[in-house]
Image: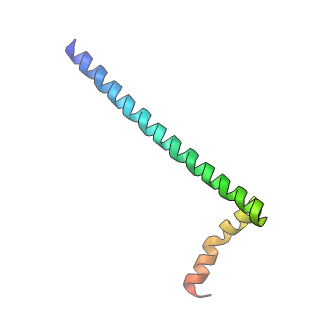
Amino acid sequence: MAMNLIILISALAVAGLIFVWVLNILKATLSTALVVAFIVAALYIIVGVGPQELLGVLLSLPQTLMDLVLGR
């Protein structure tokens, strides 16, 4: 009987820790998504750069960095 109680308490503690961990991950993910959406919206409203242009620049960024590093 005592062993079952110890196992139950341990399982509840582990479940609680996992629940808090998942909540922290969700909070970080949502805050990051909101920041990215705000930046994209601000760029579109202020500068007129749309999501397609921004994606094109981001996709060409590795090649641009390699050109800068290699001096091309």
The quarter holding residue 65 reads: bottom right
Residue ranking furthest to the bottom:
71
The percent position of residue 28, horizontal first and vertical second, equals 51, 47
The percent position of residue 66, horizontal first and vertical second, equals 58, 78
The one of 18 and 62 positioned closer to us in this rendering:
18
Q: Residue at x 38, y 29 (%)?
A: 15
Q: Residue at x 67, y 52 (%)?
A: 37
Residue ranking furthest to the left:
2
Q: On the picture, is 7 further left or further right than 65?
A: left
Q: Residue at x 77, y 60 (%)?
A: 45
Q: Residue at x 66, y 58 (%)?
A: 39
Residue ranking furthest to the right:
48
User: Can you say whether 53 is above or below 30 in the image?
Assistant: below
User: Can you say whether 49 is above or below 37 in the image?
Assistant: below
The percent position of residue 6, horizontal first and vertical second, equals 24, 21
Which quadrant would the C terminus be assigned to in this image? bottom right
User: Can you say whether 38 is above or below 72 in the image?
Assistant: above
All told, the count of numbered labels is 0
Q: On the picture, is 15 further left or further right than 33?
A: left
The one of 66 and 31 positioned closer to us in this rendering:
31
The colour scheme applied to this rendered structure is rainbow
Residue ranking furthest to the front:
46
The one of 72 and 26 positioned closer to us in this rendering:
26
The percent position of residue 68, horizontal first and vertical second, equals 59, 83
Which quadrant would the N terminus be assigned to in this image? top left
